[in-house]
Image (cartoon, helix red, strand yellow):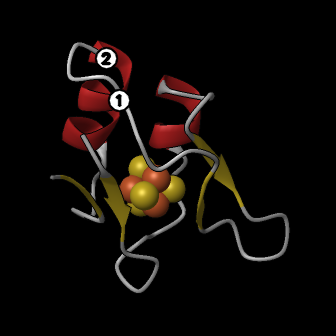
Amino acid sequence: MKIIADRDRCAGAGMCALTAPEHFDQDDADGLVVLLADEAEDCDTEVAEAVDLCPSGALRLR
Ligand code: SF4
């Protein structure tokens, strides 16, 4: 599945980077999400959890 991160909606809360650090990081300058990998296995529960936990709805799976 494809991971889509909307930096315009990101609030820099960092839940994604804490939950799935192989796929998400935060920009050193502004704290906004940086995608390290935009593809994930369908069974990747860490990525699914990160999407669910994002408080601003900035992450989607397709
Ligand atoms: S959890 Fe959501 S708001 Fe927080 S850094 Fe990640 S994408 Fe941004």
Circle 1: residue type: Val
Q: What residue do we see at 27% from left, 26% from top?
A: 49
List x then y, in percent, for residue 3.
33, 51
Q: Position of residue 33 (x, y in %)?
A: 56, 61
The answer to whether residue 10 is left or right of residue 4 is right
Q: Is mark 2 within 8 Å of ligand 1?
A: no
For badge 2, the amino acid type reads Asp
Quadrant position of residue 46: top left
User: Which residue is identified by label 1?
Assistant: 47
Work out whether residue 25 or residue 44 is closer to the camera in this orientation and state it. Answer: 44
Between the residue at mark 1 and the residue at mark 2, the CA separation in whole angstroms equals 6 Å
Q: What residue sits right under mark 2 in the picture? A: 44
Left or right: where 58 falls relative to 19: left
Residue shown at 24% from the left, 40% from the top: 1
- Mark 2 surroundings within 10 Å by alpha-carbon count, few (fewer than 14), some (14 through 19), many (20 or more): few
Q: Is mark 1 within 8 Å of ligand 1?
A: no
Query: Where is residue 24 drawn, in percent x and y?
Result: 57, 43
Ligand 1 occupies quarter: bottom left
Binning the other alpha carbons within 10 Å of mark 1 as few (below 14), some (14 to 19) or many (20 upward) gives many
Compared with 32, 55 (above or below) is above
Pointer 1 with pointer 2, Cβ within 8 A: yes
Compared to residue 27, the image places residue 46 above or below, namely above
